[in-house]
Every structure is written in structure tokens, then in C-alpha cells.
Image (cartoon, rainbow, N blue to C red):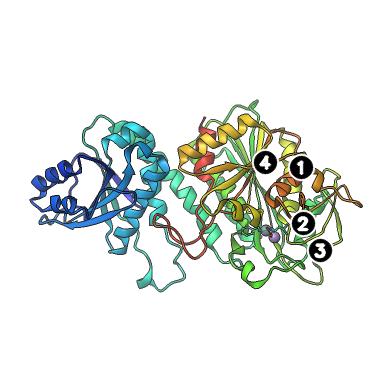
Amino acid sequence: MTTYTITTKPTKTECLIIPVFEQADLPKVAKELDEQFGGTLHRMVETKDFEGKKLQTALFYTEQTDLPRLLFIGLGKQEELTMRRYKQAIGSAVILAQGKKLRKLAIVLPEPVVKELGARDVGEDTVIAVETAGYAYDSHKQKDDRVQSIQSVGLVLSSGTYRRSIEAGVKDGQIVAASINFTRELGNTPPSIMTPTLLASEAKKLSKISPNVSVTILGREQAKKLGMGCFLGVAQGSEQEPKFIIVEYNGGKKTDKPTVLVGKGITFDSGGLSLKPGDYMIDMKYDMLGAATVLGSIRAVAALGLKKNVIAIAPACENMPSGKAYRPDDILVAMNGKSVLVENTDAEGRLILADALCYAAKFKPKEVIDFATLTGACLVALGNERSGLFTPEDALAEKLSTASEQAGEQLWRLPVGEEYSEAMKSEIADIKNLGGVGGARFAGASTAAAFLQYFTDYPWAHIDLSCSYYGGKGKPWIRYGANGFGVATMVEYLRK
Ligand code: BES
Ligand code: MN
Ligand code: ZN
């Protein structure tokens, strides 16, 4: 656990992180610091080695033993400042410092940043940036090779004016960050360990957060009784028992309609009998990140004690080939009675979500938002730093986009519509699980969304999370693997 203190003067820190804009008065800033530390910082500016360009870094060594290093990190142009940019800068600096095995850090919270983004939010998001950057999935490595956790962070303010707001933000930030890293840990865990059963037991633990949280796990028999033919169809090829996870948080009034979050929980997607080629099967442990996102979100919302009723639903199973596996040409019947022709067993996410979306209707929801690593097509369209947003509701789209911006995450709206819905109709069943507009699989992300829409009769939005992990690479501000996309956005969304 990292401890945070708010101070106007950093002491006993191994490294002071100083975020700076690309700006004209950089020489002045350098000169002031020179006076403070008796160094030659002005040279770094004069030589133009450091200009404050985005994510540019410069490391300095001082003569002061209680403050031996200054790490400058560029924020880029002031007029381009966003929460996303700010978090990336802080995260990059933290990872750089960890690379030098530093554990006691201090971070200057520049007044223009605080003024522009808001003191509470800067407090919260600084902590989120530090903790998400600090996290590494390395428990399988030798101890000596693991990333050392950050011990302490001093948040340095130029005056006491914003202290209280920052303090409140820091408290919330620790909760949100822990929830994001919880989601990431679930996602990063290897697929033979992170089975539907383990995912369900992780969900069960959420009831410890607050007496307002209750968890229900349905097994195969109960799912059968409910008529979840699509979910069970996908699950039947696997040795692993399917688990249908429901987490309820009642923070609002009894009469408040709940927001229901639905998340795809395929703990490993081999493609089933429509087997994926080997290269495409890598990273399919992450196919449960929709489930992990809704669990992380409800964890955060409950721990923050938001006055809302929120329900997380996560159908969890494996998609495996075997003699028992469901087959292309099978017809499955969902909980609402709609029949689905299976054209490809690799389009399994939409099938398990079909039953989960039907189940969500039981709660008479205010709205349902689903999260799913649903299509490679969405990844091809948007890349790995943005998620696709699909909804017929303009107001909901607007609210979700605003929330994601505040969280420093990125959503991009893509269409649902008649042509996509038409493409999913079948000759021999109500619908089929594969379709395209104008060509096989054309508009794959939108046809997948249109498929889901057949199972909704309430305000609904779908978020295609195929960007929710960075595979082997990571980014300068966050390491390898699951990035926890969506948790911060949901917190912002539900706070409103
Ligand atoms: N889990 C995958 C989608 C995916 C692929 C997410 C790559 C992240 C990265 C999903 O179950 C899938 O296999 N989708 C197919 C659908 C197709 C068969 C219509 C796809 O995208 O190829
Ligand atoms: Mn698949
Ligand atoms: Zn999948």
C-alpha cells in the first residue's frame, strides 16, 4: 500500500517529479529551481534538451541528500491539457522512477493543472495514475526480478488552498485505483487458473465490501431452468463448470431503478470448433475482461458508497472445442425464446451476452450497459486506446462520452441500425450469430452490436472492449496486459 501525504515542501523523497508545460517561461522555472537547488538546470532549458513536450523526460541529480533527484516530465501544450494527457505524464514518470528502483516519490501538482482540471479530480487521478503505473503482473517471476511497489508519495502544492479537495480526491482515487488493478489482475491471470469458478469466487468476495452488496452465483442446472440455451450452448464444450455471476449493490433508495452492467466472461476463447488459428488465440485469456470490468466497477461504486443501485451481471464460461462442444449449424434458444443459428462458434460472446441481457430485464433497469471484448473488427477500426460505443440512445451516448473524458479514457461512437439488424436475420432461425452488410463480416463490430440489440427492451449501450489490454507491449504510462478500461468511466458515470 502506498501512503500519500499532501505537503507544500517535499522532504525525504528519492525523486521529485515535476510536470511542466511546453511554455515560454521554462527558463524562469529553471532559474527558480536553480536558486533552490544550486544547480545548473537552466542549461537543460538553454540547450533545448528539455522543452516540456508531451511525455518528454529529463532527470537531474541535486546536492541535497533528502531530495537527490528531480524528474521533469513534459505535459505538452497547456491549451491541449486533458485528464488523459495528465495521467499519462504522471504514469510515465512513475514507471521511469521504478526503473531506477526508487520507492519514495513526490509529485508537484502544478497550480495551472489544478485550476484547469479541478483540485478534487487532480487528487483522484494523480493517485489513479500512480497506482495503475505502479502495478505489474509479475507474481510468476523470481522475487528479485519483480517491480518494487511505491512506498510513499508526497503530493506537493504551492499553497494550502486546494488541500481539502485534493485530500478528498486522494481518498477516492485509492479506491478507484485498487478496483482498476483488481480488474487487471483478473484479466492477467492465466486462463487455466482464472476459470469461471475462480472468477465467481472473486465475485463472491465483493460481498465483504459493504452490507449493501450481495452476490448470487448460478450454476449449470439453474441456468438450464431459466432457459439460458445460448449461454449453456457455448459452455458445453468445456470441462469447466459455467458460472452466471450476479452482484447487487443497493446504495440508493428502494424505489430507484438500478443501472445494470453486463460483462462478457469468456475465461478462454479458443474459438470452439471454429477454432482460432494459433496466432489469434494468444491473448484470449483476456476475453473475460468485460466481466472483470463490471466486477471492478461495482467494487469501486460500493466502496465509494455511491447512492445508486447498481447490478453487475457476468456470464462466465470457456469456449472450447471437444466432442461435447456446440457446433456450427446448431440452433440455440435464448431465455427470451429467440432462436439463434450458430454459423461460427467463435462468435460466442454475443451468445452468452444474449442470455445475460435477457436476465437483466428482470431488474426493470433504468439502463443496461454491457462491456465485452466482442470483435476483432472493433480493434481493427479503433486500435488499442479507444473503445467502441454502440447505442441507439443519443443522451446515453453523450453521458457516457463525457464520463469517459473525465476519466481520461476514450470512447468512440459507432453505429447500430436497421441494415446491421437485417444482416443478422436467418433463414431457419430468428437470427444467426454471424452477419455482414455488403459482404461477409463487413461492419463486424456493428453487426455484433445489432445482434445484442435483439435481446434488449430497455435503454441500452454496448461497449466493445477489444482495446482493454495491451498484450505484451504496454505503454509508457502502464505496463503489459489488461488496462482496466471502463472502470474509471463507470465510476464517473455513476457519480452523476
Ligand atoms: N473474443 C473475440 C474478439 C476479439 C478478438 C477480442 C481479438 C479482442 C481481440 C470474439 O469472441 C471473436 O472471436 N470474434 C470474432 C467474431 C467473428 C467470428 C464474427 C472475430 O472478431 O473474429
Ligand atoms: Mn470468439
Ligand atoms: Zn470471444
Label 3 sits on a secondary structure element that is loop
Which sits in the foreground, 337 or 270? 270
Q: CA distance from mark 3 to mark 2?
A: 22 Å
Left or right of 477 on screen, residue 162: left
Name the amino acid type tagged 1.
Cys
> Ligand 1 within 8 A of label 2's CB?
no
Q: CA distance from mark 4 to mark 3?
A: 30 Å
Q: Nearer the viewer, mark 4 or mark 3?
A: 4
Q: Which residue is mark 1?
A: 358
> Ligand 2 within 8 A of label 3's CB?
no
Where ligand 1 lies, by quadrant?
bottom right
Q: Which residue is mark 4?
A: 415
The answer to whether the residue labelled 3 contacts the one labelled 1, judged by CB atoms less than 8 Å apart, is no
Asked which quadrant contains residue 276, the reply is bottom right
Q: CA distance from mark 1 to mark 2?
A: 28 Å
| Mark 1 or mark 2: whose residue is earlier in sequence | 1
Q: Position of residue 259 (x, y in %)?
A: 63, 35
Which sits in the foreground, 242 or 401? 401
Q: Position of residue 331 (x, y in %)?
A: 87, 56
Residue at 44%, 47% in the rendered image: 177
Name the amino acid type tagged 4.
Pro
Residue at 66%, 31% in the rendered image: 366
Q: Which residue is mark 2?
A: 440
Residue that lies at the very extreme toward the right in this rendered image = 428
Q: Which residue is mark 3?
A: 326
